[in-house]
Amino acid sequence: MGTESGEGLKTPLAPLEEELGAKFQDFHGWLTPLYFSSISSEALAVRNSAGVFDVSHMGRLFIPAESVDKLGPLFTNNVESTKMGRMKYSFMLRDDGIIIDDVVSYGLQDGVLLVVNASAYDADVEWLREHRVNVQEITRDTAMIAVQGPKSPSLASSLGFRLGQWFSFEPIKGWERCWISGIVSRSGYTGEDGFEVIGSPQLVQEVYKKALALGASPAGLGARDVLRIEAGYTLSGAETSGRTPLDIGGGRFIKWEKDFIGKSAIEGKRERSLFGFVADQGIPRAGFVSELALITSGTFSPTLKKGIAIVVPENGAPPPGTPMTFTDPVTNRRISGKATTLPFVPWRYPMR
Amino acid sequence: MTYLVPEGLYYTKEHEWAKVTTDERGQELVVVGITDYAQAKLGDVVYVVLPQLKAYSKGEVLAELEAYKGVSEVYAPVSGEVIERNDKLEGAPELINQDPYGKGWIAVIRPKDLSSELPQLLDHKAYEEIIVGHRAAEKSLRSAERAGRPGHAEEDRRPFNRPALQRHPLRSPQPCASTTC
């Protein structure tokens, strides 16, 4: 939640995670589990079964109904008309079209909930308030977990959750009349089917414990990063940093018929898609460069057992299979492999 | 957490181990790997650049281990010629995590000058002290970080207390019917 409000914040799940043997790291001011057993085994548990992530560090901002219209000019997608029970993905841009953050909006009865990135939290809140949006910061009053993997739908039914379509959510039964209700959405950041729960710390702790008892493996942010790279998803601060949505293939989240800040800077510009790189040997890392492309995220894929990377092209993506070589600008070491399309691992959630 | 530091092996400050054995003709050989502490610090080893079958000087980069967080170098604990390397690590780098003193060995060196280099290595007790020192330093760094932030401990407890909930948007306007919340 940013450096000004205090570093080393713990999520409400931290005591449980300590008991589970979590290895913690600092993540933009939050102490978050990097892994419990190992990054590879947790990533594979999500691909093959189910894993549960504590994502309480993600910023949660409530925008009351009377302020929702003010969101219109601040987002590339129609965040202001997020229907009740539905979610939308959108970019928030500066005047020059550069991405401030990418966010997910949730349509609530009495307003809109924005889930934003911890890395951009302070900038988001400042920007929204500068534009006279009434922002209520509820990150620290709530918690959030993600249960991901092919077994998550059956896990959801064991928990008594009914999952709707992808990117939709419902109140959690029994909690809708409480001080804080809870919501369960069919969504995630791994490319697998799954669901995310937002609610009071007490509710989320309860769901977390039950999910573990039902066989989900605790998984850390190390595995989450690996899984999102395998799924070809962008990370705020990595792919988005200093770029416009069109630089990273985000055109489908832009509503050109509406006005928004940054529109005039990107209108008419050519869109470039991100592409993938699979290394022959070794691990490609963020910052490695080739003549006309830059690696923004790189890791080892435990699913493919290869080094993989998300690449931002200067002009356009090369055809899949094109041999490429990237250089580490620090050591000058070179790494060879081939261009490919994203995602590296096919998405397996139910498409609309 | 405790880390394995077997007796009878030699160690370096850079967390390599060296085991002195003999070949069938009674000549000395040194098997090299990384310690349990080192593998735990690295996390999953996902790619290994093995040494070449050639002569290395003590302290020269012998191998490279890639983990999720980055690349680490393994230095030759003694000078000599690498006569064997653990090719299994190419297909199964996780052996270093699973069995750092056994199946996770990296190379076998025919030492050039063992009698003068061996005394420069650490025994298990001296190496254990180094790990304990590292861990104490990590701990004190963490507590110093905490102490250095006024009000930090309060910050930790404050975020989830009750009063702030009053402006919670997910709150339903109806009074709470359940006793669990």
Image: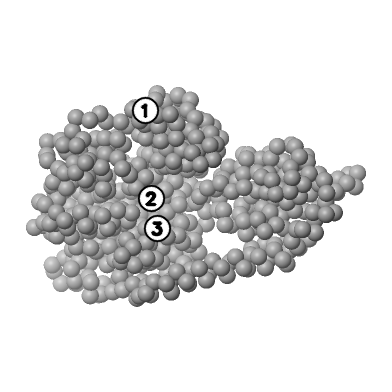
The label shown at residue A317 is 1
The label shown at residue A252 is none
Q: Is B149 situated left or right of A117 in this image? A: right
Q: Nearer the viewer, residue A272 or A115?
A: A272
Identify the chain of the residue marked 2, using the numbered disc in the image.
A
Mark 3 or 2, closer to the camera? 3
Tell me what residue is drawn at x 54 percent, y 66 percent.
Answer: B138
Which quadrant would the C terminus of chain A be assigned to in this image? Answer: top left
The label shown at residue A148 is 2
- Residue lying farthest to the right in this orientation: B25
Amino acid type at mark 2: Gln
Mark 2 or 1, closer to the camera? 1
Check disc 3 and report the residue beneath it.
Answer: A27
Residue A319 screen position, x and y as percent:
40, 23
Mark 1 vs 3, N-terminal side:
3
Mark 2 vs 1, N-terminal side:
2
Tell me what residue is drawn at x 48 percent, y 68 percent.
Answer: B142
Residue B143 screen position, x and y as percent:
48, 72
Mark 3 vs 2, N-terminal side:
3
- Does mark 3 fall on the same chain as mark 1? yes
- Does residue A6 appear in the picture of this structure? yes
